[in-house]
Amino acid sequence: MSRVRLAIAVAGAAVLLLAVAVTGDLAETASTPQPTGSLEPSARCELAPGARANATINLQDRAFGPAVTVDAEDAVAFVSLDDTSHTVTEGVSGHAADNACARQRLPPHGSTAVTFHLPGDYRFTCTIHASMHTTVHVR
C-alpha cells in the first residue's frame, strides 16, 4: 500500500509542476499584448483619416516606404505619391490578414491615417500590388 501512495504522490507532484509551468507561460503571454486576429480589429488599430500623424509612410513607384516605429496611440499617415490606386491593408503578399484592423483603398495621390492602440509589429500590404509591403513597429 505504501508503493501505491508513493505513486499517487509522485503523480500529483508531476501534475502540480505541469500546472505551474503552463500557468506561468499563459501569464507571460497575457502580459505582452500582440496584434492578433482574435482581438476586435479596432482594439489593435483603426483607420483615423483625420488624425494627426506621428510618422508617414509614402507609397511611390509601387512600393511602400520603409518601416516606422511609433508609440501606442500614435497615428501613421499613408500617403500615395503615385498616379495609380493602392490599398493600405494589414496583411502580407497582397492578402488581408484575418480580422485586419485596417483596409483602405487609396485613389491616386490619396492618403489616410491609421492609429495603433497595442504594441507589436503590424505588417501592411497593397491588395492591388502584392509585392508592396511595409511594417509599423508599435512600442
Image (spheres, grey):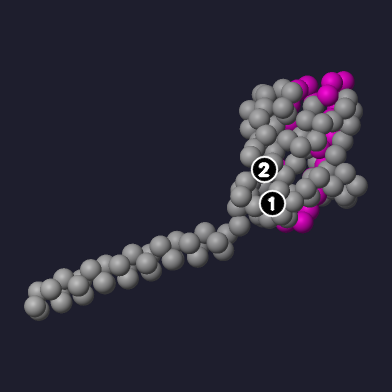
Query: Would you identify the image quadrant in which residue 134 lies?
Result: top right
For the N terminus, which image quadrant?
bottom left
Q: Is residue 33 visible?
A: yes
Residue type indicated by callout 1: Glu
Q: Position of residue 19 (x, y in %)?
A: 37, 67
The question of residue 15 being in magenta is answered with: no
Q: Which residue is mark 2?
A: 99
Q: Look at the magenta stretch and give its main secondary structure.
A: loop
Q: Which mark is residue 40?
A: 1
Q: Label 2 crowding class (10 Å Cα cut-off): few <14, some 14-19, many 20+?
A: some
- Residue 105 is situated, as x and y percent measured from the top left of the image, at 82, 31
Left or right of 69? Residue 81 is right
Marks 2 and 1 close (CB-CB < 8 Å): yes
The three-letter amino acid code for the residue at tag 2 is: Asn
**Front residue of 127 and 108:** 127
Residue at the spot x=84%, y=21% of the render? Answer: 84
What crowding class fits label 1: few (fewer than 14 Cα within 10 Å), some (14-19), or many (20 or more)?
few
Q: Earlier in the sequence, mark 2 or mark 1?
A: 1
Q: CA distance from mark 2 to mark 1?
A: 8 Å
Asked if residue 134 is positioned above or below residue 36 in the image, the reply reads above
Seen at 88% across and 27% down, the residue is 107
**Does the magenta segment cover residue 73?**
yes
Magenta range: 59-85
Q: Which mark is residue 21?
A: none
Question: What residue do we see at 80% from left, 27% from top?
Answer: 86
**At numbered mark 2, what does the secondary structure look like: helix, strand or loop?**
loop
